[in-house]
Amino acid sequence: MPRLTSAGRWTRLAVGVAVLAVALSPSLPSRSARAADDVLRYLGGDVGTLDPAFINDASDVQLLLQLYAGLTRLDENGEPYPSLAASWAVSDQGRTYTFTMRPNLRFSDGTPLTSADVRRSWLRILDPATRSSAPDVLSIIAGADERLAGGPEEAVGITAPDARTLVVRLRHPASYFPAITATPATFVVPPDADASPDWQQVDEFIGSGPYVAESLDAAKLMLVANERYVAGPPPITRIDWLVSVESDAVQAYADEEADLAGVSSAVASWMAYDPDFGPALHEGASLSVQYIGFDTSRPPFDDVRVRRAFADALNRRRLVPLAEGNGGTPASSIVPPALWPEGLPDTFAHDADRARALLNDAGYARRGDLGVISVDDAGLGVGPAVAVWREELGARISVESRDFEDYLRSLEAEPPQVFTINWIADYPSPYALYSLLLLPNAASNYGSWTDPRFVDLLQAASSATDEASQANAYAAVDAYVDDQVPIVPWSYPASWWLVRPGLRGLGDLTLGLLDFGRVSWDG
């Protein structure tokens, strides 16, 4: 899912998937921890889209997870389980998945839901006319990339031979494919969905998930239980998705206007010691990473020695706390710790002398020959890194600031030489980040890095079946990415939540994976 955000907006998304600023409140009233009857009040922020084809941030993922269903779904620990599908079988050495749908499935309006609807929903994502924001999530399917480029729909490896059977052919084996089908971008939309982003409306909403949209005003989006949901009506019959509150997240929680809200790391740092709020504060397992990217399509960063030099100069253990405070931890890999394979080394390269020698070896002994390096600060705070590049490497740096929407357009058309990105994994597998961000021709490979060796290593990791071979294969991928440096992993953002006592089923509070259909109140 595209998760590019400005530095300010990232805090609001990654620390609670809410688009509401959180202000420090040194004095708060103490209130009893009592939930509204059969209602969960969630501080979700602005409603961005009601369409899985146009997911733009983690808040969209969170909302669409409530409104639609897919072949599989993720439990509170991030493991896929059957949802619309009753089961699946794997054949052709891991290249073909055959899903058997549950009987008598229906959309929220009573319309039958069959395997043909799954196929139609996926082909809609891959249709170039739709201009979906997240088509790469299905790129592992045979013929998907070709379809996105304008190729024939019939060549895509998705068939529905009968109402309860869906057959999917993959480019190569992928043991994590059931996790992909638990991604909201792959969820099933009703038959009237077209290529426009506004076909779905709140007042006439038809979905396939645990809840349906009932009403929307300036204060909240009301979601009510879907009586026809595949798992049955959810335990909590109504979700009040709070679009705005009069004060801030902490005050809204204190005043019992919200039962679940994300808070910033700065707020969490004092709240942990507060006798009233400390017990309600929980840290989430983040699937997100912030990183620095290089435009590898042109000098000087088309030379791996230059990329290596700029990476080696950065002491991330020291610089990340300067830039992020307690809002994140230094990143040693593009893969967040929650997704690390067993045994992935947590190591950092830092050698300023080697960095200078690499620039000399690359032909830039006269640093002026590098030209003026353009760095954009729209993604994260680049001040500490820029200071090091200037002082340790003698590079001339121009820091550019622009409107965030302009920044997004520039990444697609003509990215700055050094750019910054915040990204959340679309599904719980290392492949999600490696493939969507670094494979050649991936829509989010903004640095245009192309490396056949990386492609081979990643395919080997994708094809591995047992845990030991997967761990070894992904370790090889990670080591190669670290050696070739198309990106510099920067930090793993922290996420903190205020949770009303008595709320059960939230699991690890992983970003974008809060399934309210599985949540309940005690008693």
Image: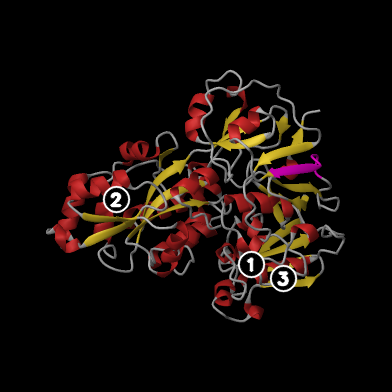
Residue 224, given in percent of the width and then of the height, sits at 80, 47
Q: Quadrant of residue 90?
A: bottom right
What segment carries the magenta color?
234-241
Name which residue lies at 48% across and 66% down: 442
Q: Does residue 206 appear in this view?
A: no
Q: Residue furthest top?
A: 275
- For mark 2, give the secondary structure: helix
Side of 467 where 157 appears, left or right: right
Side of 96 where 398 appears, left or right: left
Residue 109, given in percent of the width and then of the height, sits at 85, 60
Report the colour scheme. secondary structure
Side of 380 where 206 appears, left or right: right
Q: Mark 3 and mark 2: span between their CA atoms?
A: 44 Å
**Picture disc at residue 402:** none
| Type of amino acid under label 2 | Ala
| Type of amino acid under label 1 | Asp
Name which residue lies at 63% across and 45% down: 78
Q: Is residue 239 magenta?
A: yes
Q: Mark 3 and mark 1: span between their CA atoms?
A: 24 Å
For marks 3 and 2 on the same chain, the one whose residue lies earlier in the sequence: 3
- For mark 3, give the secondary structure: helix
* Residue picked out by circle 3: 120
Q: Does residue 368 appear in this view?
A: yes
Depth check: give the residue in front, 100 or 258. 258
Q: Is residue 380 magenta?
A: no
Side of 111 where 292 appears, left or right: left
**Picture disc at residue 311:** 2
- For mark 1, give the secondary structure: helix
Q: Is residue 145 above or below residue 472?
A: below
* Residue picked out by circle 1: 92
